[in-house]
Amino acid sequence: RKEVEQDPGPFNVPEGATVAFNCTYSNSASQSFFWYRQDCRKEPKLLMSVYSSGNEDGRFTAQLNRASQYISLLIRDSKLSDSATYLCVVNKVGGGKLIFGQGTELSVKP
Amino acid sequence: DADVTQTPRNRITKTGKRIMLECSQTKGHDRMYWYRQDPGLGLRLIYYSFDVKDINKGEISDGYSVSRQAQAKFSLSLESAIPNQTALYFCATEREYEQFFGPGTRLTVL
């Protein structure tokens, strides 16, 4: 089992749609969780951290379910500019490193 | 100016050649990383360094070596390049679990 697994993509949605991505992680001792965004042929950049109580940043909402070991990202009112690959990231327990999921591609169409 | 820079940005080389990819940062971070990214496989960690005197292998270090010349510089070498090392290579720095990536080096080994 991969340490971090994401929904297979691509997700193709119309502008204005709400889209949700899920991610599961294998190590129950993981403490830090993130969503990164990667535009085509560009470097990944931090989108948002994921906190235990859930957190929101504008149209983006991140949730953590420790019991089920999954993380979600909800994007409301999708924009064309949201088209990118979204990477789920979890800290490596005891290793001080980050583990990246393979990414889920989102394409928002007019 | 970019905080994390990589040179070269693109490189085409032949099997058996020695290649060095360079990474420099002005963020003052101690932690630096080298990843490769392949379609469908996400980011995979090659080597990482928590400070100038600390270098560690990642999950796919075979065929690669690194040098941490200073806090600001972390180089990746392919001693004898082979075609399956064709990939997009990213350098990153880290502070408090947020990673900052360079723009990437696209390497093609013929």
Image: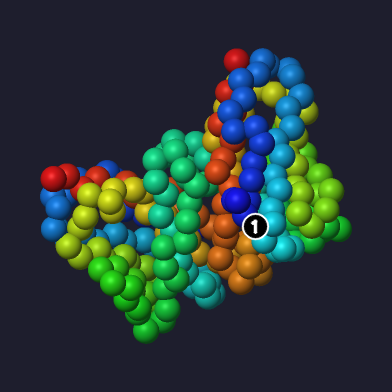
> What residue is at 17 percent from the left and 62 percent from the top?
A77
User: Residue B40 lies in what quarter of the image?
Assistant: top left
Which colouring convention does the figure follow? rainbow
Is A69 situated left or right of B93 in this image? Answer: left
> What residue is at 28 percent from the left and 72 percent from the top?
A58
Residue B76 vs A31, above or below: the answer is above
**Residue found at the far bottom of this picture:** A53
Instruction: Give the class, few, some or many, for how many residues have Cα within 10 Å of label 1's Cα (few <14, many ≥20).
Output: many
> What residue is at 58 percent from the left and 28 percent from the top?
B10
> What residue is at 36 percent from the left and 61 percent from the top?
A23
Q: Secondary structure at mark 1?
A: strand
Is B67 situated left or right of A108 in this image? Answer: right
Please give the residue where the numbered disc 1 appears in the rendered image. B93
Q: Residue B41 at what x, y percent from top left?
A: 47, 41
Q: Residue B64 at what x, y percent from top left?
A: 73, 36
Is A90 situated left or right of B89 in this image? Answer: left
Q: Residue A108 at what x, y percent from top left?
A: 21, 48
Residue B90 vs B29, above or below: the answer is above
* Residue B5 seen from this side: yes
Q: Nearer the viewer, residue B8 or A53?
A: B8
User: Residue B29 lies in what quarter of the image?
Assistant: bottom right
User: Residue A109 lies in what quarter of the image?
Assistant: top left
Q: Which chain does the residue under circle 1 lie in?
A: B
* Residue B64 seen from this side: no
**Residue found at the far front of this picture:** B1
